[in-house]
């Protein structure tokens, strides 16, 4: 993989086009709608959002999928188990294949859950 030095989310997005870019932009807009106070940053060379000093959510684009990531709590994984059953999920990432519609309603609920988790830790 080529070495990157992304300074902001726009720079990260500029390395994509087509459907992956559209999906990442939809996630970015959704994050700002759910958490307008979230600050855009680059962490681990991928887009991330912080609320205060806490990381809220990360996302990244790939040829076949988009990943939404954060070290998921057991509570989150249990709360969204039905929606997650048909997706590739790890302890830190959920993959959304490009050949399937992006479930923005589900992602919005997941972001709201994460926002509550962040608020409880503050």
Image (cartoon, grey):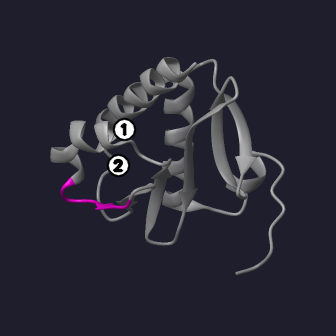
Splitting the image into 4 quarters, where does residue 25 fall?
top right
Relative to 62, say whether 6 is above or below. above
Mark 1–mark 2 distance (CA, rounded to whole Å): 9 Å
Q: Is disc 2 placed on a helix, strand or loop?
A: loop
First in residue order: circle 1 vs circle 2: 2
- 6 left or right of 38 in image: right
Q: Say which residue label 1 marks.
A: 107
Q: Is disc 1 placed on a helix, strand or loop?
A: helix
Marking on residue 52? none
Residue 47 rendering spot, x and y as whole percentages: 65, 48
Verify CB contact (< 8 Å) between mark 1 and mark 2.
Answer: yes
* Count of picture labels: 2
Q: Say which residue label 2 marks.
A: 102
Residue 68 rendering spot, x and y as whole percentages: 47, 50
Relative to 30, say whether 94 is above or below. below
Q: Nearer the viewer, residue 17 or 50?
A: 50
Magenta region includes residue 89: yes
Q: Quadrant of the N terminus?
A: bottom right
Q: Residue at x 63, y 36 (%)?
A: 49
Q: Which stretch is magenta?
A: 85-90
Relative to 84, say whether 114 is above or below. above
Judge depth for marks 1 and 2 and give the one in front: 1
Pointer 2 local density, CA inside 10 Å: few below 14, some 14–19, many at least 20? some
Q: Residue furthest bottom?
A: 1
Splitting the image into 4 quarters, where does residue 94 fall?
bottom left
Pointer 1 local density, CA inside 10 Å: few below 14, some 14–19, many at least 20? some
Magenta region includes residue 31: no
- 65 left or right of 11 in image: left
Give the main secondary structure, helix, strand or loop, of the magenta stretch: loop
Splitting the image into 4 quarters, where does residue 5 fall?
bottom right
């Amino acid at each position: 993989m080529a070495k990157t030095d992304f300074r902001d989310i726009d720079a990260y997005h500029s390395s994509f086009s087509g459907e992956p870019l559209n999906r990442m932009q939809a996630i970015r807009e959704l994050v700002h709608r759910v958490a307008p106070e979230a600050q855009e940053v680059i962490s681990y060379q991928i887009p991330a959002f912080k609320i205060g000093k806490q990381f809220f959510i990360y996302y990244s684009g790939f040829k076949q999928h988009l990943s939404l990531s954060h070290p998921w709590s057991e509570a989150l994984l249990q709360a969204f188990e039905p929606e997650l059953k048909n997706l590739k999920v790890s302890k830190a990432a959920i993959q959304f294949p490009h050949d399937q519609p992006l479930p923005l309603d589900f992602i919005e609920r997941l972001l709201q859950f994460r926002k509550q988790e962040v608020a409880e830790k503050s």
